[in-house]
Image (tube, rainbow, N blue to C red):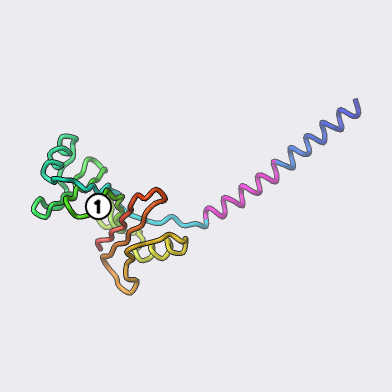
Amino acid sequence: MKKTSIIISALFAAFFLGSFVNGNQNASKDKTEKKQRNLKLGAFSMSLNVKDVKISKEFYEKLGFTVFGGSLEQKYLIMKNGNTLIGIFQGMFEGNLLTFNPGWDENAKNVKDWDDVRVIQKELKAKEIAIAPEADEKTVGPAFIMLSDPDGNVILIDQHR
């Protein structure tokens, strides 16, 4: 009986010690994660490479999207459905893009707290993410950068202000 209570006490102590150590490791991990700042990328949209902007416009209107910006003459439109944005672009780029607009919300309104594209670029480069083309860090105002995720999906970070 004495042997059983020693084993139970040892198991309890091991469990308690393990919980204490894991709790401290998780707290340490949480502190490390909190140190990483979230980049403020701005409004998000899908930019679609389309064959015919007029036909695509009609299709997306049937899905409830309305024209928010752009022009048919320039062969691109920004369309909106609620908070969802898509851009349809004829002949401007290859493939589709994930697009972020620092400094804007989904209504193309300026936001107060945002990261300039050059700040985003600097932080991404520090994390060893390849960027091409890069924004000129000596400039201010509108600029863009492009990068690809591990699967080759192209991401455009396009600042308009």
The answer, for residue 111, to whether it is visible in the render is no
- Label 1, residues with CA under 10 Å away: few <14, some 14-19, many ≥20: few
Q: Is residue 13 above or below residue 97?
A: above
Q: Is residue 81 visible?
A: yes
- In x, y percent, where is residue 59? 15, 37
Total label count? 1
Q: Is residue 134 left or right of residue 32?
A: left
Instruction: Give the residue at x 61% y 49%.
Output: 27
Q: Is residue 111 magenta?
A: no
Q: Residue furthest left?
A: 73
Mark 1 lies on residue? 94
- Location of the N terminus by quadrant is top right
The answer to if 32 sits in the magenta stretch is yes
What residue is drawn where x is 24% and y is 55%? 109
Using the image, determine if residue 13 lies above or below residue 137. Answer: above
Q: Describe the element under mark 1 as helix, strand or loop.
A: loop
Q: Magenta residues, as a range?
A: 19-34
Amino acid, disc 1: Glu
